[in-house]
Amino acid sequence: MRTLDWSAGDSGELRAFIGGHLVVGFWSFEDLAEWVGEWADDSGVVDADDAQALLATMWRERVDEQRHWRDTGSFGRLEALFADLDADGILARSCFQCCQQCATSAIAGERTADPGSPDGFAEWGYVFFHEQDAMELSVQPATLYLGYGVFRPAPYLPGGLDVAAAHEESYLRIARRVVDGAREHGLDAEWSGSSDDRVALTLADWRKPLPGTTFPPVASLARAVGATRRRLGLPWRSRG
């Protein structure tokens, strides 16, 4: 992800740079401190100490704001969706890698070993959004695009499909599962129906707690529980 975009390089632009990253919410204070230092050095307008002081003030203000949240809005709903996908063997990752190409290349390294599966891993497919996608969340409402793909054919495909047809049907199944699941969790999801196109979510109330802060991580806990139950071979939830 490119972090040093600036034009005037003044304190107002730096404030917008910091504020956007805080709203998106995926990066630690240490990450932002490094980027703000580089930004100040590169622009040469704002004093480096003043830049770090501005970051510290804005971070505290964001943490104070979180204390008044009733919930995490569309962030929490997206986390719940990703928990369901993880439990169904679809590896789900947020703010993963810098771009589509890097995320697609690296996602296989996130799989969970499973000696009992056809290819030795638990997950048969994946879905993600990358860092450039995530930065679109800095202004609401935002469109968040989800990439997806397969590691192996989807389970329970109809018989008689050749390799190419099985591959295409597996892609379509993931996209349909993502869209249906998103809508079940109250998210606005759109997809063209083509495996060439990503799924688009429209998010209007993104409230992601900053890393290391104390807003209750309910959905994140659900994802961890779901992953543990899957590794143990236990049912995730009732399908009735």
Image (spheres, helix red, strand yellow):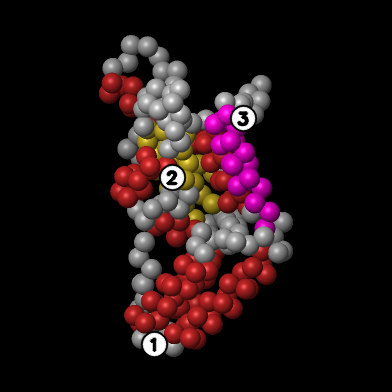
* Residue underneath mark 2: 128
* Residue underneath mark 3: 236
Q: Is residue 186 visible?
A: no
- Name the residue: 40% across, 81% down: 40
Q: Nearer the viewer, mark 2 or mark 3?
A: 3
- Indicate the amino acid at tag 2: Phe
- Name the residue: 63% across, 73% down: 61
Q: Is residue 92 visible?
A: yes
- Tag 3, which secondary structure? loop
Q: Which residues are magenta?
A: 215-232
- Tag 1, which secondary structure? loop
- Residue 148, x across and y down, in percent: 40, 39
Q: Which of the two residues, 114 or 171, is positioned nearer the viewer here?
A: 114
Q: Is residue 216 magenta?
A: yes
- Name the residue: 45% across, 56% down: 134
Q: Is residue 150 magenta?
A: no
Residue 102 placement, left or right of 218? left
Residue 66 placement, left or right of 177? right
- Residue 93, x across and y down, in percent: 47, 45
Quarter of the image that includes the N terminus: bottom left
Mark toward the start of the polypeptide (1 vs 2) = 1
How many neighbours does mark 3 have within 10 angstroms: few (below 14), some (14-19), or many (20 or more)? some
Mark toward the start of the polypeptide (3 vs 1) = 1
Residue 141 sits above or below residue 21 on the image: above
- Indicate the amino acid at tag 3: Trp
* Residue underneath mark 1: 45
